[in-house]
Amino acid sequence: MLPPSPKIKDVAEFAIRAYQDDYIPKVTSHHYSIADVFQDLVHRDQGESSRATIDDINPPQQWGNQPEFNRIHPNIAAVFLGERVYWGAEAIRACHEAKASSSAVFGFTLKARKQFLNCVMTPGLSGDPAPVSGYETLRWKTLKGKTVSGHSRWETYRPLRFPNVTFITHTVQTPDEVAEAQTIDSLAANAQFEATLLWRGVAEYQTQGAAFRLMWGAGTLSIVFRLGAAPTVERFENNEWKLWKTLEGVPLTTFENGTETNVAIQRIAGRLVVSVDGHGYELLGSSKAKGTARGEGYDLRDVTWKSGGLRVRSYGVSVMVGIAKLLHVEKLVGDEKAPKTSPKGFKPMKGDVERDVTRPGLTPRMDAEAANGTGKPGGWAKDGTKSTIATEVRTNVVRYVCALEASPDGISAPFANKVVAQYLGLFTVDNAPFLDITKACVSGTETTGFPPICPGAEWTIEVDRSALDLIDPNWRNWVKQFNPIEILIRWKYTDHTTSEWVGRFKGYISLVSMKVTGVNKWMLTLHLRDPIMRLQKRHSVIDHNYAPMDLRFVQKRGAPLYGWECVKDIVTIALGENEGNNLIAQFPPFHYPLMSAITDNGGWVAHTPPPTSNKFKFPAPFGSTPIEWIQDFAKMDYAMFFYGHPTGTFGTSQTTGSNSGTVQWPVPIYGQYPLIIAGRPTWVVPDDNYEPGDLNLLAFMGEITGLPEEQINRVLVWSNPPSGVGPDLPFPAVRMAEGTLPDDDPNAAIYSWARTLIHTGSQFFQPGLANYHAERVMALYRGKKIRRYRFECRGEERMQWGDLVMPKMVNTGANGSYSDPHLGVNGERFRIWRLQNSYRFHEHGPEQFKTEATCLPVSALGF
């Protein structure tokens, strides 16, 4: 509570300063942002060839006719990851047909090149074919299978259709026999490979089900072919195989002699991708999340597998097995100029896409803008892979190159499905002189209030134009629409001392109105708005200057991204770096981020390492306004945004403005209501002069008004399942609850009628939650006097919305006057909800500066 001042207010003093437009921050280099989603840029049925005809010798050049791109390198592969996986032209077709799906992902990765291996049984037989020289050898050993003359029936074999490589096969398959072999040599962790299976039929007189299992990842993953069924992908957990996915759409397995099946095991964008004869399927990993902001649950995780050997197990099926590595390298054995050695030392594959993006209506400032451009591709880039963006500013376009590079071992390739690039502009502010127009100002009003209902501080000032001419004949250079203006207030006390200047307002002239009120009475009306005006419609728009906030998250390398950081970026681009740096964030120490890659399940939006959508998490809402985008983040943070003083008391905020001296001015504040109002001062407003200092806030008027719209005595809670319901539901909701005030409450419905509040949402669908919520809401209204208290007092330049007010009405008539006992507000705490100051700049006495406040009881608000 503020102690009463022994000094008595006498005359309010004002300083009203108008600036020329040089004082407005000027853009010296433009902001510019690019937010490309590749699925929106590729054209169906274009790009497979750059020539109209294909000759017999030279292969066609892929990607040549994609009009949105300057170049797509031949090493680049288009891939669609959804319920099914497609490549190339089929991927483009699929992404156009599934654009409405949020669970499918389209993007670019690097092609995988097939390097066959010589599969050799160890020990072998004297008649085994020799491995092809120059290729790697994959050695196998027998685990199960009958022998002939002490030799395993697993043998090395060279099929006629693959004369340059060796396979393994179990030569004689007896009925119901289990034959199993495993590689001696291990494949690297997450190694991609392709298995070629040449079926030779099922053993005659097989009585049990015929099947074949191919295992990898140290025996933790497998694909199983069963006679008459679709293949299945299975995981080994808790000492048993468990189904992961049935590959519906693959023809049923027949094991017919002479048929061939090709199985590709790949890892794309953190997924396991299994392809059987061109039918591709994705499998995503998950793990139990630790308890965090959203509670326990399961998070998506990258699929990985361990280093280990391959293993094959046959149940009565005769098959020849060949293995090839799938590598992202520039050269393979057999390529021109490629050494006839292992591909381990080959260079990792590289590829890129190049695109020009038009700069609409901007004059480029090459040096300033090229120096601070940053870009990041969206997608997946781990395990030593690289995914980078290089930008170049040209006369009418910005050119970017999205470059992909495989891991040094050629095993993994990055995946890119979007690109974000941004050039941060620069602002300068000239140290412009001001014109003090106080002597020409006649009267004014100021209105501020709770930010959700009052968009910012507003002033109206009446000015005598004749007096302006006496101050400066060229006053129109300062007093005109959109020019900056400042207002300072202080009090001169009866002892001739003065209080400190208070920076009450710093903003812009939003409207100028000229009028004549009599003979030679030429007046000017100025409407003033604080900087929030520049974040609203017409004054600003979300356009190509703004990038999705996903860019900041990537720049932070997965560290928590907070809402206030996004708001700071918006304010910086709209109003300049100084305003952005002045932003004050007020949140509890452990407030949740919008997104985080560090904590499980942490954040408003879940972060999943494998990309699951082509959409941005926080896209720029093009066409809307900066204040609307800020309000979107405020909803996620349960926060508010306004201009004020961070602790609620004037004289403690940041100093801004080159001509402001030591005066403290309102700054942008973004935070949660309880913290914003914490520590606000309590103003005691007496109805009489009880003790020294009471005259400074002596109430001229006090009024209590009921609020019928807030006198709620009944609440209904309606909730439907998150999956939704049909349009013809014959009742309000699937889950319904009702709460009412008890009959002993003065506001209960039995004394008048039901005044109903309705809350809806799927969050109440869990059993018991709707009833619990109804009870808790009614508890907030029980026994509450919800009314409005309004008062007028002598002007107080430090008072603002959110401050506490305590009426002091204890006059018992000893001095001939009585306090009204029926108002019932003495000693009760109220919170200022709306504040209006009125000024008569050159008068004296109580009418010179008056404060009128509308307040709500703290008991009803809860704070």
Image: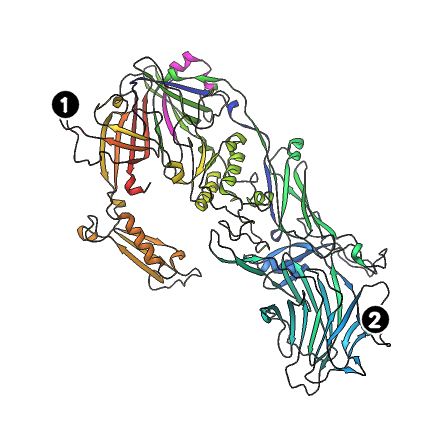
Q: What is the number of the mark on residue 815? A: 1
Tell whether position 465 is magenta: yes
The residue where tag 2 is placed is: 163
Q: Would residue 105 be seen by someone viewing this image from the given angle?
A: yes
Residue drawn at 78 percent across, 79 percent down: 152
Q: Is residue 489 left or right of residue 58?
A: left
Frontmost residue, 110 versus 484: 110
Disc 2 marks a residue whose amino acid type is Pro
Q: Secondary structure at mark 2?
A: loop
Answer with left or right where residue 163 lies relative to residue 527: right
Q: Please state if 407 lies on the left or on the right of 620 as rendered.
A: right
Q: Residues within 10 Å of mark 2 (few under 14, many from 20)?
A: few
Instruction: Report the magenta residues as a range.
Output: 457-476
Which kind of residue does numbered mark 1 sit on? Answer: Asn
Residue 222 on the magenta segment: no
Residue most toward the bottom?
Answer: 205
Residue at screen point 65% across, 73% down: 224
Task: Determine the secondary structure under disc 1.
Answer: loop
